[in-house]
Amino acid sequence: MLANLMGGALADAEARSLSRPLSAVEAAALDRSPALDALAALAPADRIKIIAEIKRSSPSRGSLAAITDPAALAVSYETGGASAISVLTEGRKFHGTLDDLEQVRAAVALPVLRKDFIGTPYQVFEARAAGADLVLLIVAALDQGTLQSLQNLVRELGMTALVETHSADEVSRALDIGASLVGVNARNLSTFELDQNLFGTLADSIPSGVVRIAESAVKTAADVAHYRAAGADVVLVGEALVTSDPIRTLSEFLAV
């Protein structure tokens, strides 16, 4: 599944580059106002922080929500106390677009994450050109050299990489490239099975000074409490927010 998602995202980026070449995207990225400080927004605090996700669909669950106005949803997230907004821009399975990200960036004052299957500099420049402050890098999808070079480019553009892991080896690889935000995804991207206890088994291998982010398998406040007790500084939540009253749900989750 991960290979298919990555291959599709790279093919779509290549198609976009035919009408908008790298030089144009790079110029647009460099013309943007400086990225917001995501590390400050997500720094460990006395209570859990939440990255609230705009997510229409997923390969595992199918359609979740129409989300005809991503900017309005992002404003609800900001009102509800989210610390950052994640925008899925992958089109084939998640039905997201870069336009969604641009709309969200224009509507909120929070850091915005481009959540996609990133494997080329073109996609990183696209993220900054659309106003992203953070970019997702998935360790399992990238060789170490590519992971390091993309991390370097993200930093050169003033953004922050959320480096996603699924195993102790991947956490080690994330730390080797100097990741300051390390996510542990409970969803196996090959089988799409969930293991909510995976974060707890890996958290101790993420040193202090690195923000620890728990991803996936968050449906209730009890799930948030589970991750907080295991050492999470931040949780990333999508499905539970797009299928409920987001402000009420955020209030419940932040009360943990």
Image (tube, helix red, strand yellow):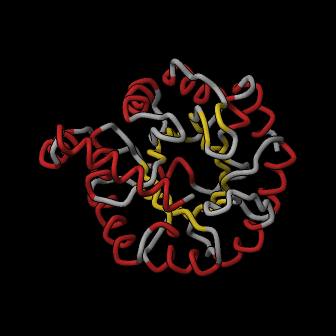
Q: From this view, report whether residue 155 is shown above or below residue 128.
A: below
Q: Nearer the viewer, residue 115 or 256?
A: 115
- Residue under the point 79% across and 59% down: 196
Q: Is residue 60 left or right of residue 27?
A: right
Q: Nearer the viewer, residue 240 or 79?
A: 240
Q: Tell me, yes or no, if residue 206 can be seen here.
A: yes
Q: Is residue 9 left or right of residue 49?
A: left
- In what quadrant of the picture does the N terminus appear? bottom right
Residue 66 rendering spot, x and y as whole percentages: 59, 22
Q: Is residue 235 left or right of residue 119?
A: right
Residue 133 rendering spot, x and y as whole percentages: 40, 46
- Residue under the point 58% across and 41% down: 83
Answer with the quarter of the image where residue 145 lies.
bottom left
Residue 56 rendering spot, x and y as whole percentages: 58, 31
| Furthest-right residue in this view | 222
- Residue under the point 73% across and 65% down: 199
Q: Tell me, yes or no, if residue 212 can be seen here.
A: no
**Number of numbered callouts drawn:** 0
- Residue under the point 65% across and 52% down: 234
Answer with the quarter of the image where residue 94 lies.
top right
Residue 41 rendering spot, x and y as whole percentages: 53, 47
